[in-house]
Image (cartoon, rainbow, N blue to C red):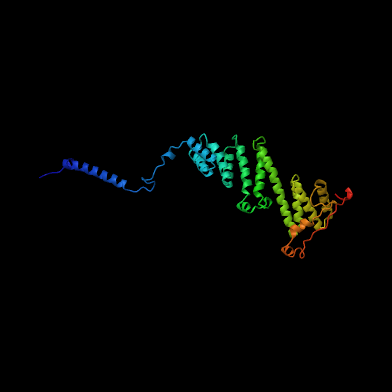
Amino acid sequence: MLQITTSSWPPAWLKGRKSLLAILLCCLLSSSCSSIPFFGKDDNDDVDIEAIETTEERVYSQAQSALRSSNYSLAIEQLELLEARFPFGNFAEQAQLELIYAHYLTQDMDSARATADRFIRLHPTHPNVDYAFYLKALSAYKYSEGLLDRLFSAAPATRDMAPLRLSYSELAILLNEFPTSQYAADARQRMLQLRELLAQSEIYAAEYYLRRGAFVAAANRGTYVVENYADTVARADALAVMVEAFYKLGRQQEANRALRDLALNHPDYPAFDAAGNLVLEERVRNRDRSWTNIMTLGLIDRPDTPPPITIVYPDAATDR
């Protein structure tokens, strides 16, 4: 009888086949794995070897070329690529500054201000951080010039003044933090322009209140201009507003005081007649005319125009 012991199992002829089966099994597994689809980039897709091998200098050079050719969209793309791939490179900080400028030139003021804010926060001691402050302030100013304003040529004083006030305050910060900046002179000039616009917007609001009969509110607007924008051209109009508002409120003393101030500091104001009286008839008629008055050639619904207002010079003790 043939006896099989554990030491003789498996037989020699089966050991060779077992090795062969293991090899075949490995081959099948490897082939089946290669047939599993990969949900990523297809093998047939072109690989952008040029983009992979792009150097920091090359990206920055392409951004500079795009800026010089006024291709600001491409410049933004290259500058953002440079910042993403080389955040600590030699051109990283300069690229961030130029990115602010590129957004500004494309009229994307929100992105320009956000980029400037980020640069100021990350690099507060950078030698050109004043440039970021400067462009941030200009972006707020440009933000007020909306599409409708450009299409219909709206008067600047009729726009939303919030961006202009923001721009004014940020220019003031620039001058306070960097008084010797190369942008300081332009910042001062722009602040003067902004003061004129802000003052004129107050006059525009005051005239609206006069048209609505809200004389107290109109007088308050005029007073605000006199107290806060005394060096602007709008100061004369503010005093005229105060004269009219106080006159219609029956507050003769305040009206006369504003009139004397107007005559003393603005003697060439066009509403003065040859005798030195303040004539508001034309001013009120142009502002307060209704459609009925216009259609009837001024015969019906005439605006309430005050007579010429004469300056009274009482004793100093009685008019304080």
Q: Where is residue 77 in the image (x, y as percent from the top left)?
A: 50, 43
Q: Position of residue 231 (x, y in %)?
A: 75, 44
Q: How many labels does the image show?
A: 0
The quarter of the rendered structure image containing the N terminus is: top left
Q: Which residue is drawn at 60% across and 36% down?
A: 128
Q: Residue at x 16, y 42 (%)?
A: 13
Does residue 39 appear to the left or right of 150 in the view shown?
left
Task: Pick whichever, 71 or 202, lies toward us.
Answer: 71
In this view, 12 is above or below 207: above
Does residue 33 appear to the left or right of 67 in the view shown?
left
Q: Residue at x 61, y 45 (%)?
A: 139
Q: List the single residue furthest toward the front.
A: 297
Q: List the single residue furthest toward the left.
A: 1
Task: Pick whichever, 265 or 84, lies toward us.
Answer: 265
Q: Position of residue 74 (x, y in %)?
A: 51, 43
